[in-house]
Image: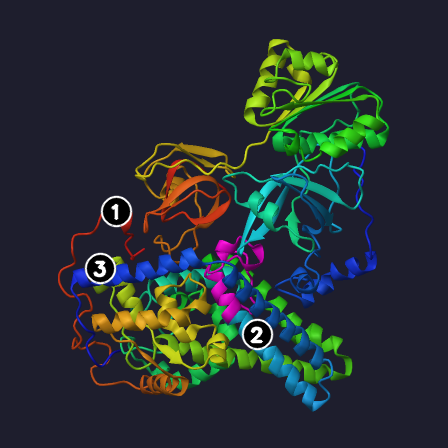
Amino acid sequence: MSPTPTAPPRPNRLARRLLGSALAEALTTPHGVDRYIELVRPAFSLREVRAELVAVHRATARSVTLTLRPNANWAGFRAGQFVRASVEIDGVRHTRCYSPASSAHAGDLVELTAHAQPDGHVSPFLRASARPGMVVSLSPADGDFALPDERPRALLLISGGSGITPVMSMLRTLCEEGYDGPIAFLHYARDEHDVAYAAELRALAARHTNVRLLHGYARQSSAGELRGRFGPAHVRAAGVDPAEAHTFACGPTGLVEAVRGMWVENRHEERLFVERFEPPSPAVVDAGGGAVAGRVRFARSGREAAGSGTPLLDQAEAAGLTPQSGCRMGICHTCSCRKLDGAVRDVRTGEVSTAPDELIQICVNVPVGDVTLDI
Amino acid sequence: MSTTSPPQLTPEQLDAFGRELDAIRERVIADLGERDAAYIRRVITTQRALEIGGRGLLFLSFLPPAWVAGTAALSLSKILDNMEIGHNVMHGQYDWMNDPAVNGHAFEWDSACPSEQWRHSHNYMHHTHTNILGKDRDIGYGVLRMSEEQRWNPYYLGNPVYAVLLALFFQWGVALHDLEVERVTAGKASWKDKGEMLGAIWRKGRRQALKDYALFPLLAGPSAPMTFAGNMTANAVRNVWAFMIIFCGHFPEGTHEFTEEETQGETRGQWYHRQLLGSANLTGGKLFHILSGNLSHQIEHHLFPDLPAHRYGELAVEVREICERYGLPYNAGPLGTQFGSVVKKIVKLALPESGSGERERDVPPVAVAPAPPPPPRAERQPVAA
């Protein structure tokens, strides 16, 4: 079992016990206690994790570092895990995955860093508009890409671009623990001004002799210790034996696959852990909006079918599911369910929607390419 | 039950009419954002404040001014919760926000009716089959005679009495609505299939009753009986107000009913047309509209049930103009007039008329010529389930 992640101390146990009591529930029925308290304390909830932004720092032109104070429902995280953060933009709540970059021992504060993606919606908003006082929702920490509880003998941490965050958390966590095994931290960025944690990394490497810091800059071929693309020379420069160390690689697909390819070739892939950081891609849809073959996945029931041009409700029923439905013409919203990803076309208007994680009425939407529904 | 025949539109005109309304809908959907989110949150904050304030004052309800103010605040709280917030949120009007607090499927309202059953009987059944005799159970709610087409029998002599009782206890009437009791008593359905629904009604009703009639009064100590009376009054005020507004939606003089045959294979334009002709608006000021849950804009609500209701006022200007251009009626009037005509109908229909039970076909069907060949499947869903 893991060492208990450092969770924040729970203030006001009596208040929470009273608010969570059956009496409070009965007095506030049907809305529940949360819906009253949150009007005065937006970050409060009996069960949901919410966090208040206490500080915002824009270290580079593209990135924004958010310091969050989660509420009492936050149970901490293991270094390397991610959270789903929900933020409201123009009335609509959007959810994205971010990996805390702070040390897992940091107690009551969690640090996230978002990099504004060119086609993104949430990351540019955060870069431009995040300010202290905002409240966001968080999921509990999740993911298997995490430091094992029994700390490895040596570590090779490889990251590119926004993938720096989980390995930053690993590095900070280990340094705080006084870990003395060798740690090689390889980071690939566009140029030296694009590294959100440049200063912190330098400081950690200076203070901890077991930490070797190596940078590669795609647009500055002469700067940085790592020249050119990731390859055996970079691994040699790291000075850590991949056959002995645990390697964590996180970043764009190109980098991650290069690492994986090399590790597989050298047969130490069981010591490699990877996480791909790609922005949620808006599904590519051809302008004609014609039928695009794809597969329809029903995530919750685990079924899948070849997509057809008929509404998703009909396709779900053909696959043996029985989602609730009503008018079957897009008025009553009985059949509304979550599209986890993919593109759909509304048969009434012809409009195509590609947003990830949105509610759609499946009686009037046909899939365009692959679609995943939460039913 | 119209006295004048509805204007005839050609299939092409109906299609054009439908397209104009579709265009309004799409435009509003594209425009939804911060303004709408901020609005519904303001209403919710106001409702919660009235609720807390009202119940707080009712703790002091041994003082008459506190009783009056507390009961008034709690009445307003329940009205806002059920109408501007509950009814509208449950329609999915704010689903686009992705906020669980205003999600149509998740929202539960401060009323004895389980939200799940309301969504079924109202969002689905009533809005799909609006004013279709034999399909829209809101015509009479299974207890009243609201249409000449409902065959008279001596039970209906009590029509006005049933209406008054339904009004006073409306939240319980609504709670029982989806059970379709009149179908069970007519032998068309059986109680043994209603187990789950009855269970849900019992649980929701019990929680509501416990809150209003046991817990808050008991917590009020010496004020207990006054608090009880205040809570009961607040529920009754909400019941009667909701009854009045809702009954003005489809029953005033000038609204039309439809038969199943004439609405077979309805096109989108015809669907809009039926929604328009079956609905009636109430005129009034901004506060009146909010307190009616914007059901004062019943026409706009029936044309666009899933657009945020606070937008209906702006849309009404355009809708009226479109109706004028197509020569279609736009039924609107003040509460007194519209409700007056509803009361008149309730009383009149308590009595048998000559030729009762058989409708005189003096009103030609709404859809004029033979229905056009159905458009390609992907664009249209037939109305009849």
Q: Residue at x 53, y 63 (%)?
A: B114
Left or right placement of residue A216 versus residue B294 in this view: right
Residue B148 at what x, y percent from top left? 27, 78
Residue drawn at x 13%, y 63% as measured from the top left: B369
Is residue A369 positioned above or below B177 on the image? above
Instruction: Report the span colored magenta.
Output: B84-113
Chain identity of mark 1: B
The disc placed on residue B377 is 1
Q: Please give the label number shown on residue B15.
A: 3
Q: How is the image coloured?
A: rainbow
- Badge 3 crowding class, 10 Å Cα cut-off, few under 14, some 14 to 19, many 20 or more, is some
Tag 2: residue type?
Lys
Query: Could you tell me which quadrant the N terminus of chain A lies in?
Result: top right
| Residue B268, above or below A369 | below
Label placed on residue B78: 2
Locate residue B364 relative to residue B82 in the image: left or right: left
- Quadrant of residue B91 in the image? bottom left
Return the residue found at the far top: A266
The image quarter in which residue A329 lies: bottom left
Q: Amino acid at mark 3?
A: Asp
| Tags 1 and 3 on a common chain | yes
Residue extending furthest front? A222
